[in-house]
Image: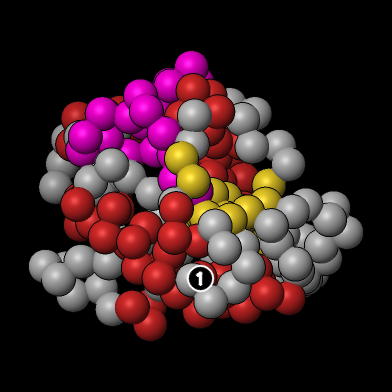
Amino acid sequence: MQNINELEELIKIVSKLPGLGKRSSQRLILKLINNRNELMKPMVNILAKVYKNISRCNKCGVLKSNSIGCNNCEITDKKFKKICVVEQVSDQLTIENSNVAQDCYFHILGGTLSTSNKERKEDLLISSLVERVRKDNIEEVIIATSATVEGQTTAYYIQEKLKHLKVKVSKLGQGISVGSSVEDLEDGTLLSAFKNRTLIENNKD
Ligand SMILES: [Zn+2]
């Protein structure tokens, strides 16, 4: 392939997407170029729309359309009594696809607490979680963070922040091996982790 700056730049960007190396990015981009009208044009249009209209809700972290309110935390007509707390939108998708938390609202933190990556507490949606629990009379907060040091540190911090509220706080149970993230769990493992979730004792009373 000739050295064309725009293409090189595009390949570099696409290669940053999960599961795509340089070669697969090249193939994908060639497919787009060879199908300008059927694929590339509609993709450019929809990407521009998504860029403009879709963002994370700054209260609960889920993806929402900017033109309407957030139907996860603002339009709470479902009246669920549980909130499932995850790190990323991809974790929410995994849990939704496995149908294990159909009676829960979601809350997406946007990362984990860690001393190494300098992610600050204020950047994670923890205060807004406490606010939601209080405002929506939530009865149980299910913390579904990764089985990593950062994920567990975050879970502990959230638990501390919720201590003063009369809410049950639980964590996903057995079956999740150390180091794994929720996004990568199989349906069976997730189901068992939800069923066997453990109540964090000091929040009981
Ligand atoms: Zn929201």
- CB of mark 1 near ligand 1 (< 8 Å): no
User: Is 28 placed above or below 163 here?
Assistant: above
Residue appearing at x 48%, y 17% in the figure: 188
Q: Pointer 1: what residue?
A: 162
User: Is 35 placed above or below 203 here?
Assistant: above
Q: Amino acid at mark 1?
A: Leu
Percent position of residue 147, x then y: 28, 42
Residue appearing at x 35%, y 24% in the figure: 175
Which residue is more in the foreground, 189 or 21? 189
Report the side of 144 relative to 75 (left or right).
left
Residue appearing at x 57%, y 63% in the figure: 205
Quarter of the image with the N terminus in it:
top left
Mark 1, residues whose alpha carbon is within 10 Å: few (<14), some, or many (≥20)? many
Percent position of residue 161, x then y: 45, 74
Residue 141 seen by the camera: yes
Percent position of residue 200, x then y: 44, 51
Count of picture labels: 1
Q: Quadrant of residue 69?
A: bottom right
Residue 125 seen by the camera: no
Q: Secondary structure at mark 1?
A: helix
Start and end of the magenta stretch? 170-190
Which residue is more in the foreground, 60 or 34? 60
